[in-house]
Amino acid sequence: MKGCPEYVLQTFGVKKYFDASRTFFRQAKQVRAVDGVDICVRHNETVGLVGESGCGKSTIARLVLKLKRVTEGKIFFEGEDITFLKKDELREIRKDMQVVFQDPYSSLNGRQSIYTIVSAPLYRFKIGTAKEKEEITKEVLDRVGLRPSDMFKYPHQLSGGQRQRVAIARAIILHPKFVVCDEPVSALDVSVRSQVLNLMKDLQDVFKMSYLFISHDLSTVYYLCDRVYVMYLGRIVEEGSKEEIFSNPLHPYTKILLSAIPQPVVGRKKDILLLAGENPSPIDIPSGCRFRTRCPFADETCMSCDPVLMEVGMDHKVACLKIKK
Amino acid sequence: MGKQLEVKSLTVGFRSGREVHNAVSNVTYYLNRGETLCIVGESGCGKSVSVSSILRLLPESSTVISGEILFGGIDLLQAEEKTLDQIRGDKISMIFQEPMTSLNPSMTIGRQLIESVNAHERVPKEKALDLCKRMLTEVGIHDAERCMNAYPHEFSGGMRQRVMIAMAMICKPEILIADEPTTALDVTVQAQILSLMRKLKNEYGTSIIFITHDMGVVAEMADDVIVMYAGEIVEKSSVTELFTNPKHPYTKGLLASLPHIGEKQNRLYSIEGTVPSLANMPAGCRFKQRCKEKCDACNVHPDLYKSGEGYVRCVLYSRGDDL
Amino acid sequence: MDKTAVQKKRSRENGFFYNFLRRPLAMFGLTILLLEIILIFLLPVMLELDPYYMDTPNVNNAPSSEYILGTDTLGRDCLARLCEGGKTSIIVGTVAVSISIAIGVPLGMIAGYYRGAAEMIIMRLADIFMSLPTMILVLVLVAVFNPSLAVIIVVIGIVGWTGVGKLVYAATLSVRNKEFIDAAKAIGTSDFVILCKEVLPNVMTPIWMTLAFRISAAILTESSLSFLGAGVQPPQPSWGNIIAAAEQFVVLATRPWQWIPAGVCLFITVVAFNLIGEGIRDVMDPRTRKR
């Protein structure tokens, strides 16, 4: 299998299993957090990965960033297989691949000054003299809308939005080609959220970066992303361009997800589809289609046959047995 | 209809060091029987404080400086602890954002439910058990029998919130206060809980005070809305009025900064700057530093002016209805 | 007051020393301790005291103008020996605790950060150490290696690592899953650098909080050892072996000047350290920082 250089990131059948509840007397059970996921991200594109808590979307972020080892499958970065690269071989790739986490309180080390945090990549890759490092840091802080004097502050002296700006500054200081954003705005207040979203969009225009934008909030995904993957219990159930997914959702789960978002519009007559039952645990994944236990349309075929993603239109794939071409 | 609960010029102070800052200043609102009042605002705007004072559940570091809260002819702020205990849970009950912290992890759900029944009236055990099971079924827990014997950690977040709602509703309270009950939940679970709350409201005629920061939830739940900013009410109106004709620049900004599905938006509107901290509250209008429509008159602290059906705290509306 | 002044004032009010200096009991402890240390080190120099000189004709003298605290059974100056013993105690306390920290912090961090086999081995080792009665363990070790000041310091230090290690281990566990660790890994930072720069500053708080208690415990252990005869060996004095002289009933009953001062000093030192320790803990833990 070979990667394609026109994609910044490609994953093929990536799986991540954890051992759960292993005790002295009990056999280990496997948590299938990510169970065969193909994702590709083109240059200068924003790809949304949507799903609810426990569906494995954050695990994907960590797999792609090579913070965790995949159980199975391949990951390509700009056409190069990085699945089994060692630490020092990853060095160059790390410059091009960065991350912004959800919680701006735990993603910044409270004991370090803003300068130390933001300039860390410069020190790690030994870029520039001390004076140049300071210049670069000032410039990037300015770029994300912080004052140069904030450099000497500590995270606890900043507000949530400012902290997230610091995290973004740290991510873009080396001008990476690809940034994984793991729920970067869900911990922020509404008025601050739009500031950060706009900032991310502006930065993308300037630096021509690609984003993998992981979120449970479909409205922000709609605003920011070009293409969307919908994830349920470790699998992609639907993928496609933003327009396709939002105007013509096919998978029952996507439909339910879309109808569940409370819209800030009053008097909208809508039929809210309610999801029945509880999320199955990734330890005991249902046989056949993994959504069948909660699917309003499930029948016997869904119990025995595990659906794969099928092309149903231009840039639109669905994994559901009920959807015919 | 009619005013069921009235909060009059409530001011609550927080001690920070030797200084006292007002977390909530001069908040006045009332709740109509059978209606849902949403209080919306960003973190630190005082929305939680303004309702936890109703049952006097404020944290230790805070004190009510002035105001009164009238419920059934009693001022809850002055009432004795004993009177208050009779009201808590029985007439007014509350659910919180994080259900796990409000459930006792070492007691079965059944025992906790029965305790909240017995706190207000002594009923025979079988009757209480029966009541609990019926309530659990009511909130959408199908396996009520098994649920009664389970411990809180065996449930998912959504199920725990259902249990909390069952516990809050078991004495059929007149008022339910919900402090961000769905913030910690997934969207699909949120939709379930919201529809459950609507159903219970219609069945029992309970009035709801619903605190949230999500304008989408407001649009779905509210009859009346209060928008809070920096410890003050900045706008008060019916839900239709608020979404079709927002008046305060802050409300307008909030609504404009939301991404809408199905609408092409190249840039989101954003309110510049950050909320002023309680310690450095600007004189005059508290929103003026971030306001696009500010003028000299904003240096004087504006009152809550009547405008149309609602109220706005902005000098632009100081001339009253003729706008 | 303008905004920056307010901010400055606020950040100062959050400062460690600002709050520490405003705790009367902790300050009292600190003053006493400093005074004691100054006296211990200055008095012998100023009064030209010699703890080993035996003034044979003047054995068991009661306090007088010549010997302020009298003389002991061998005619040595009690004040001189008290000061010399104090030096020993202070040195044992600080050096032994430094050794505990030097062993406990890295082991605790490694166990908490890597988990797995390292965690298993290190934490079980700590359990083994903790399950043995400290005093007996120290006695055995000292007996094996001959009691000298250096050996005693090292042994007390080694035995004390478990407490430090467990604290650091617990703190590391809560830090290792923070996202800033992942952020550091995402730029390819090595584990060693992550441990030193990201983890270490975040796990030291509980150590500073308990530092003073640890020092006072080490001083007490040394005194107990010396009292039992397994500690600092005569003629070198320590508060422990000075008090041990009171074993003889004659000394206990008729010559209080030979042992009471050492006992009082030991008591004052331990109390002072504990007061300081409580002060540090209260200031560092915002939950107990009340007014």
Image: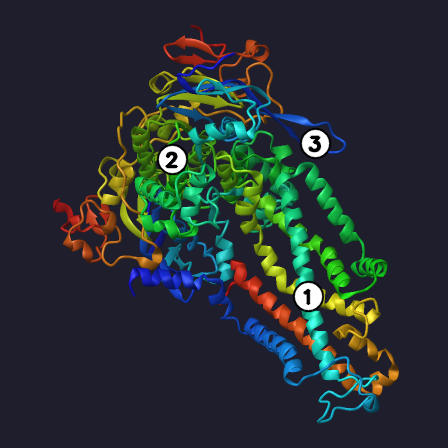
- Neighbor class of circle 1 (other Cα within 10 Å; few <14, some 14-19, many 20+) is many
Chain holding disc 3: A
B260 sits to left or right of B64:
left
Chain holding disc 2: A
User: In x, y percent, where is residue A60?
Assistant: 51, 26
Q: Where is mark 1, residue-wise?
A: C93
Quadrant for residue C40, please give it.
Answer: bottom right
Labels 1 and 3 touching (C-beta < 8 A): no
User: In x, y percent, where is residue A131?
Assistant: 36, 46
Give amino acid for label 2: Ile
Query: Residue extending furthest left?
Result: B322
Q: Disc 1 vs disc 3: which is toward the camera?
A: 1
On the same chain, marks 2 and 1? The answer is no
Q: Where is mark 2, residue-wise?
A: A172
Query: Residue extending furthest right?
Result: C249
Give amino acid for label 1: Gly
In the displayed structure, would residue C152 be above or below residue A41?
A: below
How far is the residue under mark 2 from the one under mark 3? 40 Å
Quadrant for residue A228, please give it.
Answer: top left
User: In x, y percent, where is residue B7?
Assistant: 35, 54
Q: On residue A22, which mark appears?
A: 3
Labels 2 and 1 touching (C-beta < 8 A): no
- Neighbor class of circle 2 (other Cα within 10 Å; few <14, some 14-19, many 20+) is many
